[in-house]
Image (spheres, helix red, strand yellow):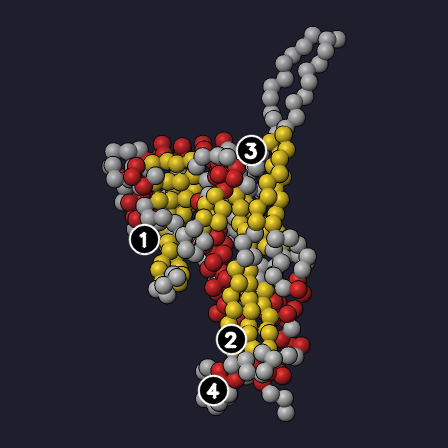
Amino acid sequence: MPNIIDVFSGDAFSVKELTDSINLFPNSYGLINSLNLFSHKGVATTSVGVEINKGVLNLIQSKPRGSQANKNIRGKREMRFFEIPHFPLDDTIRPSDIQNVRAFGSPDQAKTPETEVADRLGEMSKKHDITLEYLNAGAIAGQILDADGSVILDIFDEFGVEENKVNFDLTNAAVELPEKTQEVWGLIEDNLDGDTLDGIVALCSPAFFKSLVNHKSVKETFKEYKDTTVRLANILSQIGNAGGPGLPGTAEQATDPMRRDVRKGFFWQDIWWLEYRGKATFQQEDGDTATRNFIAANTCRFLPLGTQDTFRSYSAPADWMETVNTVGLPKYAKIVPDQGGRWVELLSESNPLPLCLRPKVLVKGARAAADL
């Protein structure tokens, strides 16, 4: 009878099967993923080149017939290269993890190598997922951070632009918030550079969201609230996200913030406002854990929905011989048996790089001037 280590060497535990398995686990990394902002592309290299075509739209001066025509001014093209970060995560399965251990939820069935691998893969997959959500949150804020807070990529610096910021001054009851939302719309529309949008979503920290809902401008708007948010349903159907976890699927599901808990979202000033509570822990060098909030306290992030070329996410191949120069997948997994038969290593990794290719459309909202 083969031992446990021999079983792990079977076809069911090949790189292809395990990689397919870890990619089949439902994504659990939350709200930003549910917005379908980022179009995914696998690449066969560990860096990605982005070609930027700065087209020029200029008025044409009239000329007398028969005279020399105006010369066309062509846009400049440039290439930018970005290294794709590498996120490996390994685990070890020992015979003692399986031998004489009862399967979860079963009174008399023992654990098997298959169930143990599935359990470990599920846990590791979720950690890759929450890491990607964290990276996505960085991309929509213009600065992708590592778990320890160090900067992986400053998108604003790379593209040579400054971040657009709007102080909503929510501590001031006299401020007219519609003027602030109009400023947000203008900043995004002016910087689409040929792309299109179907709407705008605002991902708000809890403190920003609470101040917004309780502000005089919002309360007065909803005194005579009518459920007429038809445009919301149109936006959702166009971006293919009806019924997703972050946004309601129909206009009828939009709600009055003065009567119900609307942290899952409400539609106001042609913007879909959502409370975003994304956070996760990471282990520091001294072994202690700390928590990272994915959106800074007292701030809000405004994003265009339904764009075609503004948000991209790239995946590089795994750092393994089997995957050299192959098109990258979102996640990878494989098993490496110990030569002495004492354990097997379960290896996983992801190599994602989310990017905003038009960072001027990223608008930061602040609860007060001190939060800008």
Circle 2 crowding by C-alpha within 10 Å: few under 14, some 14–19, many from 20: some
Of marks 3 and 4, which one's residue comes earlier in the chain?
4
Q: Secondary structure at mark 1?
A: loop
Amino acid type, mark 1: Arg
What residue would you read off at disc 2?
A: 92
Q: Nearer the viewer, residue 94 or 106?
A: 94
* Residue 193 - label: 3
Q: Residue at coordinates 37% horizontally, 40% vertically from top-left?
A: 365
- How crowded is the residue under tag 1: few (<14 C-alpha within 10 Å), some, or many (20+)? few
Q: Quadrant location of residue 173?
A: top left
Q: Amino acid at mark 2?
A: Thr
In this rendering, position of residue 252 left or right of residue 350: left
Disc 2 versus disc 4: nearer the observer: 2
Instruction: Give the amino acid type for the residue marked by disc 4 in the picture.
Output: Val
Q: Is residue 261 above or below residue 15?
A: above
158 or 34: which is nearer to us?
158
Q: Quick check: can you spot residue 34?
A: no
Label at residue 260: 1
**Looking at the image, is mark 3 or mark 2 nearer the viewer?**
2
Label whose residue precedes the other's in the sequence (3 or 2): 2
Tag 4 and tag 1, C-beta contact below 8 Å: no
Crowding at dot 3, Cα within 10 Å, few <14 / some 14-19 / many 20+, comes out as: some
The circle drawn on residue 101 is: 4
23, above or below 244, in the image: below
Q: In the rendered image of this protein, does residue 178 appear above or below residue 10? A: above
The quarter in which the C terminus is drawn is top left
- In percent of the image, x 64 and y 79: which residue is there? 9
- Observer-side mark, 4 or 1, equals 4
